Amino acid sequence: MTKGGDTRSSIVREALSLATSVGLEGVSLGVLASRLDLSKSGLFAHFKSKEALQIAVIDEARERFAERVVLPALAKPRGEPRVQALFENQLKWSENNGLGSGCIFMALVQEYDDRPGPLRDRVVDSQREWRDIIAKAVTLAAREGHFRKDTDAEQFAFEFVGLATSFQESHKLFRDKSAKMRAHTGFERLLASVRARRN
Amino acid sequence: MTKGGDTRSSIVREALSLATSVGLEGVSLGVLASRLDLSKSGLFAHFKSKEALQIAVIDEARERFAERVVLPALAKPRGEPRVQALFENQLKWSENNGLGSGCIFMALVQEYDDRPGPLRDRVVDSQREWRDIIAKAVTLAAREGHFRKDTDAEQFAFEFVGLATSFQESHKLFRDKSAKMRAHTGFERLLASVRARRN
């Protein structure tokens, strides 16, 4: 915490962790300052407003999601293995992403779908980007001959997101031990519906 | 607003509407009192605590969901028609339930999955009840011979909830005109996977 950059990072990390449990609107500069043993003016030296901090938190969450979910999947071979890795990594992220259990993006969707403004815009961007990443991996899997040529990649992404969200509800809200099995069963059915027939 | 019961109902209705947009934790007794032109002590005469009001709000939301989603579906014939009606009514509820757009339960899941206590317990109850209602309709559809005898009703409910949640994200967050078509396509595939084969 000696350099400005370190302090800034600590603030964002702490705010992200707080937002994961109480929501991004629930992040209070006062609480953060006291948790980090900073003065409120010390905190304001890094973020001129609560909104600036909230934007930094969403950006940090996107970076972590990219590192933990997207990039390891992109390292897999194109086609079904990559699509499967995206799904597995998303489930792991919901189970434990170093911020406590639960996917912060699912919480952000519910928190901001009703609140127009720059935060909502970032949430929309992040969720669209995620669906586009899934759809692109599906399109590549069709090109590789793993999935049927007429696979509707956006439809696949729509259902993928649904299964992941239902998993989070079962896992985190119900603490249901069968959540992962259910998610896999649903995903296997989704995959089976688009797999190319091999004669 | 002349009688106590009316005032109480008005408070709960207003709080439910507020919670639908800002979350149930965001419901402030001060804001509510001023919206309803009541004194804070007048409001406290009906609810001794914020938590008591929040519980009343969840109960009110459950009643409305029962009226608009569950009961009209139970009026349909047992079997696939009832299962389809549950799904259609859930989509309509997410589109417009008289509280503004969006399903308050999906927001409550995200808001309370991390907050142990009586509110979380009620959210768990309401979501379990909803999955049980779906699963029961599916089991009846299997008994009626519409769905295969070995249909996994809980798995069906898991995927049903996922499609409905993804619909809400597409409809409310992205304002995507194709959301309903996507939800129907996914649901049709889910139905096709469990329908009994007719020879």
Image: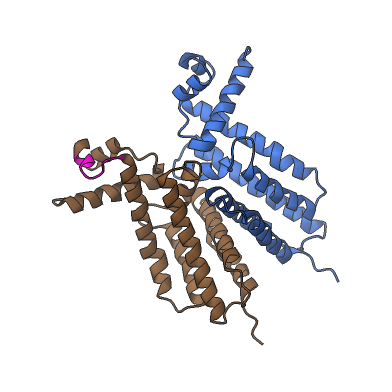
Chain colours: A brown, B blue
Taking the magenta stretch, the answer to whether it contains residue B148 is no
Task: Give the camera-side residue of B69 and B38.
Answer: B38
In terms of secondary structure, what is the magenta stretch mainly? loop
In this rendering, position of residue A174 left or right of residue B97? left
In this rendering, position of residue B193 left or right of residue B39? right
Identify the residue at image location x=57%, y=42%. B105
Identify the residue at image location x=55%, y=40%. B123
Q: Quadrant of residue B145?
A: bottom right
Q: Where is the C terminus of chain B found, in terms of image quarters?
A: bottom right
Q: In this rendering, does residue B136 appear at all?
A: yes
Give the residues drawn in magenta, as a range: A42-49
Q: Where is the N terminus of chain B found, in terms of image quarters?
A: top right
Horizontal and vertical percent position of residue B192: 73, 65
Taking the magenta stretch, the answer to whether it contains residue A46 is yes
Q: Quadrant of residue B125?
A: top right
Identify the residue at image location x=77%, y=50%. B82
Residue B91 to residue A191: above or below: above
Horizontal and vertical percent position of residue A24: 39, 43
Task: Give the camera-side residue of B47 and A125.
Answer: A125
Task: Give the camera-side residue of A70 and B173.
Answer: B173
Residue A39 to residue B139: above or below: above
